[in-house]
């Protein structure tokens, strides 16, 4: 079977699943050393990786990729160093494998343990972000898994260059390169084949635009961890500090609008509107942010466009902000429940009771009290790197690090106990 024919992905998956056994058999120090060597290879091969990324960027501009996708695609020396630093942080983290999370003794003397073990073979399906190639590999290997990577065609050269660095580290330590397998041909038919390999793949994680994630969820015969979009809100409470709230707004909306933890909607309590709204609209205008607001918002700025219902459900990934004035915290929570995507919600308030009510009233994967939505990120929350952000209520919710790539199994330690001793006596 040639590299682009039917069965190509199954062959990769079979080899990766076999290689996973070698990774799971490594001890803590060996897996740490492996990930450290991967980080070192990225730094040492910086010029090659950046040259490959320059090719992808040029092709992306020629093909009309939008600013948000180009920003996700772009690598530079600083970003590559940050990727390597994230890998080193993953390497240094406590080993999740073999951890006993609970131990109980039953009345019959048996000891029941819950122990962390690898998921097995994980499929990553992603767009634009070449950093995912390194992050996913490090996190999967840290947790004793193998990974099958399918990046988008727009990042093909970058992903290949990064994978070459990872394979170099595996070879250096005498480990099978198949533990990190990159699907060289990103065509849609191979994605469909990948999603049908229920006998080989233990979990699929799509990372990209809503269209990609829905395609994966609709066609998968394997378990899928996903989030469709990030409609993230900042609620400025009546008891907010206006200066803090402005900082949260600027960082959340204008620092990097093309990412899933950027703010898309601002909700402002009516009591703080006279103080906060003029400042907010002024600073958004200075930052080049287009504001779409409700009727009460528009009374504070002639440049504010009327907001339609669809604007409050939109993930713009751009310098566009939807704004609504609300009469209460309860109304803000009702708005979030209707339009939110379970990703990230932020409250600006100096009222502890309001903060706790907001936390209890939202169901998002991360809730921020007087902290930017941009902190809902694996590296910022102490995971070193993340393989994705889950808004699927399965075994993981929010940013997923190495621990989220394990599952707990039961280990029972006995001394010959049997469930039906009378049947033993009868024999």
Image (cartoon, helix red, strand yellow):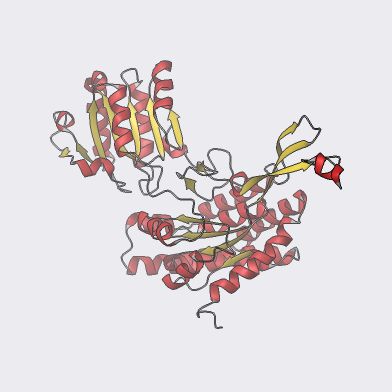
Q: Does residue 194 appear in the picture of this structure?
A: yes
- Residue projecting furthest to the front: 426
- Whole-percent x and y of residue 316? 30, 47
Viewer-side residue, 120 vs 179: 120
Residue at 33% x, 56% y: name it: 67
Q: Does residue 47 appear in the picture of this structure?
A: no
Residue at 27% x, 37% y: name it: 284
Q: Is residue 353 above or below residue 149?
A: above
Q: Is residue 75 left or right of residue 61?
A: right
Dividing the picture into quadrants, the one containing residue 164 is bottom right
Q: Is residue 164 above or below residue 145?
A: below
Q: Is residue 139 left or right of residue 330?
A: right
Quadrant where the N terminus sits is bottom right
- Whole-percent x and y of residue 102? 70, 34
Figure disc tally? 0
- Whole-percent x and y of residue 50? 51, 63
- Whole-percent x and y of residue 156? 47, 68
Dividing the picture into quadrants, the one containing residue 364 is top left
Q: Is residue 332 left or right of residue 117?
A: left
Viewer-side residue, 285 vs 358: 358
């Amino acid at each position: 079977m040639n590299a682009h024919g039917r069965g190509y992905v199954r062959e990769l998956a079979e080899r990766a699943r076999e290689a996973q056994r070698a990774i799971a058999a490594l001890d803590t120090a060996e897996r740490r050393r492996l990930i450290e060597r991967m980080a070192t290879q990225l730094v040492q091969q910086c010029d090659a990786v950046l040259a490959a990324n320059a090719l992808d960027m040029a092709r992306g501009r020629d093909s009309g990729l939008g600013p948000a996708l180009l920003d996700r695609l772009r690598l530079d020396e600083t970003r590559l160093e940050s990727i390597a630093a994230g890998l080193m942080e993953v390497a240094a983290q406590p080993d999740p494998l073999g951890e006993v999370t609970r131990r109980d003794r039953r009345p019959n003397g048996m000891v029941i343990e819950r122990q962390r073990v690898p998921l097995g073979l994980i499929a990553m399906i992603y767009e634009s972000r070449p950093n995912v190639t390194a992050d996913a590999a490090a996190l999967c290997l840290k947790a004793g898994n193998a990974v099958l990577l399918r990046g988008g065609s727009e990042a093909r050269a970058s992903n290949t260059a990064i994978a070459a660095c990872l394979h170099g580290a595996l070879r250096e330590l005498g480990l099978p390169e198949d533990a990190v397998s990159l699907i060289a041909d990103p065509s849609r038919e191979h994605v469909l084949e990948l999603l049908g390999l229920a006998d080989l793949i233990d979990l699929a994680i799509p990372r990209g635009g809503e269209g990609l994630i829905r395609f994966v969820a609709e066609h998968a015969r394997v378990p899928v961890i996903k989030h469709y979009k990030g409609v993230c809100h900042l609620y400025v409470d009546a008891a907010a500090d206006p200066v803090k709230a402005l900082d949260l707004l600027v960082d959340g909306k204008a620092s990097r609008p093309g990412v899933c933890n950027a703010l898309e909607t601002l909700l402002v309590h009516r009591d703080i509107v006279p103080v906060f709204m003029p400042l907010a609209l002024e600073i958004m205008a200075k930052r080049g942010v287009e504001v779409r607001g409700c009727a009460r918002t528009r009374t504070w700025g002639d440049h504010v466009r009327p907001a339609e219902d669809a604007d409050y459900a939109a993930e713009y990934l751009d310098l566009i902000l939807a704004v609504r004035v609300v009469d209460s915290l309860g109304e803000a929570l009702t708005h979030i429940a209707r339009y939110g995507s379970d990703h990230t919600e932020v409250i600006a308030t100096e009222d502890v009771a309001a903060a706790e009510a907001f936390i209890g009233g939202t169901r998002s994967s991360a809730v921020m009290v007087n902290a930017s939505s941009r902190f809902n990120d694996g590296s910022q929350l102490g995971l070193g790197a993340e393989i994705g952000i889950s808004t699927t209520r399965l075994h993981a919710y929010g940013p997923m690090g190495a621990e989220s790539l394990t599952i707990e199994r039961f280990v029972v330690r006995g001394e010959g106990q049997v469930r039906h001793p009378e049947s033993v006596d009868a024999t």
